[in-house]
Amino acid sequence: MLAYGLATYVLFLKPMIARVLGARSAVTAAETAVTDLGAAMSQTDSVVREYNAINPQLKEKVRSMVPAEVDMPGIMVQVDAIAAANGLVLVSVDVAVDEKAATTAGAKAVKIAMNLAGGPYDSLKGFLRDVERSVRLFDVDSVTFSPENASYGVTMTGYALTERK
């Protein structure tokens, strides 16, 4: 009788106990995953609430600084207006997306090369000051001066977000 009891234990009960213990560990792992997911959802909800609480005018100002798309005509118009305000003539402008530039994920660098003419050095300084103060974000990369024809070459970089959600 003892042999039958031992055989029953070894053949039937022991594998069942092992399966139950395995199932318990799987349940525990699933409960931990659910708890972690709930914490992540709570944190996401908190971030969304904080974003929604930001002043809409401030959000719009940030969108103006780094627009959601590369607006080449808009860049040309803005650069021309800054040049004209400082007594300079925009002789030529070339705007191109720089695919090789290293930027933050989701951002694109926009290279802007231009030639300006028609004003003294103070006009160039005013132009650079106004570019620096413009709402849209620009980095001036280089400035060249040609004294024989009083012209200036300016190369700068603007930015656009390409993955705004």
Image: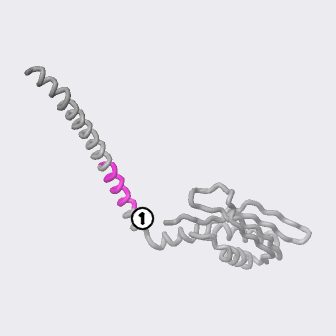
> In the picture provided, is 78 more to the left or to the right than 106?
right
Front in this rendered view, residue 125 or 50: 50
* Residue at image point 30% right, 50% down: 34
Front in this rendered view, residue 134 or 9: 9
Q: Write down the quadrant of residue 74 in the picture.
A: bottom right
12 over 41 or under it: above or below:
above
> In the picture provided, is 60 more to the left or to the right than 96?
left
Q: Residue furthest right?
A: 148
* Residue at image point 24% right, 39% down: 24
* Residue at image point 71% right, 67% down: 96
Q: Write down the quadrant of residue 49 in the picture.
A: bottom left
Residue 75 drawn at (x, y percent):
67, 73
Amino acid type for the residue under numbered disc 1: Tyr
First to last magenta residue range = 35-47
* Residue at image point 17% right, 31% down: 13
Residue 32 drawn at (x, y percent):
30, 45
Front in this rendered view, residue 145 or 7: 7
